[in-house]
Amino acid sequence: MGYLKDAMEYAKDFDCTVITGDVLDFTSHANRVTATEILAGKDYLFCAGNHEFCPKVGIPDSFARKDEILDEIQACFRGNMIFESRIVGGVNVIAIDNSYYIWTEKQLELLKAEVARGLPVILFCHSPLTGGNMNHNPTHRDLHVSDEVIDFTRKVTQYIIDEPAIKAVFSGHYHSTMTEQLGDKTGYILGGLFKGIVGEIIID
């Protein structure tokens, strides 16, 4: 958690700080207490990562467990880790949860409402959009979902790629810094904070 403390100190003078998940690594009591203490009083947007809901590294992900502990994990962080937006210098900055590699109908509804505000959008999420997880090829560990959910998730991903108001997408999850092509826009994937990596975005 030392890197998190340093990163939040570094970010204190920026207009907006976004954390794209996997702060807890796993959901031990000590991890939750430490994260809560470091982030107390800090201003940031946060979207959950898959590790936010894992009781121990290596245990398969579970929708049921995520639902069961969602409120408990949310209490460690400010805002709403499922969907939150903020206007920063005329740009709509949105953090949206895809920690378990699906989009929901409510998220799509909220996203379209934000797009309708007519501002350029920068989107932040945990999992990159074109990888095997978001395309469910193959299904990630034990997170089996219906064909209907897979089809809906792919359609929302395509909406994000095609929507001209969404100018760029930033994510993490892969632990390495790279880019992905999203139609005529770029997806930026940032390496892990556990490697001491942070990203700085300048909009002019």
Image: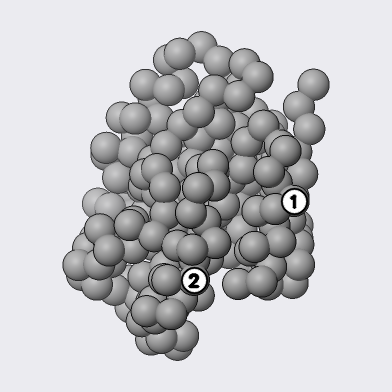
* Circle on res. 34: 2
Residue at which label 1 appears = 10
Residue 117 marker: none
Q: Nearer the viewer, residue 154 or 60?
A: 60
* Relative image position of residue 192 (x, y in whole percent): 67, 66
Relative horizontal placement of residue 190, taking residue 22 as reference (left or right): right
Q: Indicate the amino acid at tag 1.
A: Tyr
Q: Nearer the viewer, residue 94 or 13?
A: 13
Earlier sequence position, callout 1 versus callout 2 = 1
Q: Seen in the image, is 71 located left or right of residue 45?
A: left
Vertical placement of residue 117 versus 183, above or below: above
Circle 2: element type: helix
Within 10 Å of the Cα at label 2, are there few (<14), some (14-19), or many (20+) other Cα atoms? Answer: some
The residue drawn where x is 43% and y is 80% is 30
As measured in the structure, the alpha-carbon distance from the residue carrying label 1 to the one carrying label 2 is 18 Å
State the colouring used for the structure image: one colour
The residue lying at 40 percent from left, 43 percent from top is 79
Secondary structure category for the residue under label 1: helix
Amino acid found under the numbered disc labelled 2: Thr
- Residue at 55% across / 15% down in the picture? 119
